[in-house]
Amino acid sequence: MGQPSGSDTARDTPAAGSWIGAIVLGVAILALWATGLLAELVQPERIRRVVEAAGSAAPLAFIALLVPLNLVFLAGLAIWISPSIFPLPLAILYSTVGAVVASAGSLVIGHFLGNEWARARVPKRLHRFEKRLEAKPVRTVFVLRTILWMNPGVDLLLAVLGVRWRDYLVGTVFGMVLPTGLRVYVGYKGFEVATGSSPWLIVVAVSFLVLVVVLRRRSADAT
């Protein structure tokens, strides 16, 4: 039985840089958990204090905070409470910009850790979008963002497939606006929704859910 060639071995073995990157990322998350910082940053009041303490740099602090929170699927909490920190129009603006930046950060990390590492962590249900990403990248990124919003699995898939930055940013920016804005506004009007005093907002929310269902079905039919 022949021995595998050097090139085969290289293909089957993840790059050393990928393992180093994965270890660094794991240690960073573990350090946040061990020091209690991660637990503090999942508390709405703590998030509010951290951002407000930045003073005039509060928008930048808020956007920067979304990057690590997105890696542990907690960015939604900060976006939900953003109207309690900023006026509603600015909360929508900063949250949308932050969502795009945080997602781009996940994409960069996916590139840094390597295709082997990233591909192993892409949810199986996302692999059906691969051919569509190659044929219509901007439209497919837009659909993925509208349906799955800030899910880091989307960024890992796009990193694996090497989607161009232009296509990624265009699809992500336009795909983030509606779901992010809706989440911010629901957070702003949460009490009114709960008491039924904003029925029109419920109509908007239901309409968005219908849009998501339609996009899901079209995506399934196209694959």
Image: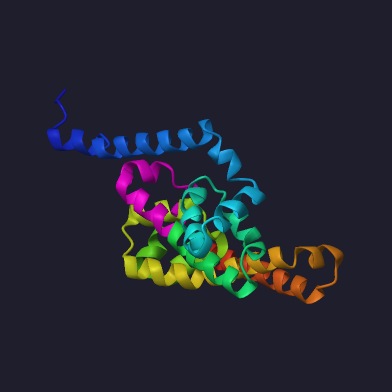
Q: Is residue 29 above or below residue 75?
A: above
Q: Is residue 16 visible?
A: yes
Q: Is residue 89 above or below residue 10?
A: below
Q: Is residue 15 visible?
A: no
Q: Position of residue 48 (x, y in %)?
A: 62, 55
172 horizontally vs 113: left or right: right
Q: Main secondary structure of the magenta part?
A: helix
Residue at left offset 46%, top offset 33%: 31
Q: Magenta part of the protein: which range?
A: 103-129
218 horizontally vs 10: left or right: right
Q: Nearer the viewer, residue 114 or 29?
A: 29
Q: How many marks?
A: 0
Quadrant in which the N terminus appears: top left
187 horizontally vs 38: left or right: right
The verdict on residue 111 being magenta is: yes
Q: Nearer the viewer, residue 189 or 182?
A: 189
Answer with the quarter of the image where residue 91 lies.
Answer: bottom right
Residue at left offset 49%, top offset 57%: 61
Q: Is residue 206 above or below residue 117?
A: below
Q: Position of residue 132 (x, y in %)?
A: 41, 65
Q: Position of residue 159 (x, y in %)?
A: 35, 54
Residue at left offset 65%, top offset 59%: 81
9 horizontally vs 200: left or right: left
The verdict on residue 98 being magenta is: no
Q: Position of residue 108 (x, y in %)?
A: 35, 53
Q: Residue furthest top?
A: 1
Q: Is residue 24 above or below residue 118?
A: above
Q: Nearer the viewer, residue 215 or 193?
A: 193
Answer with the quarter of the image where residue 4 lies.
Answer: top left
Q: Nearer the viewer, residue 118 or 198?
A: 198
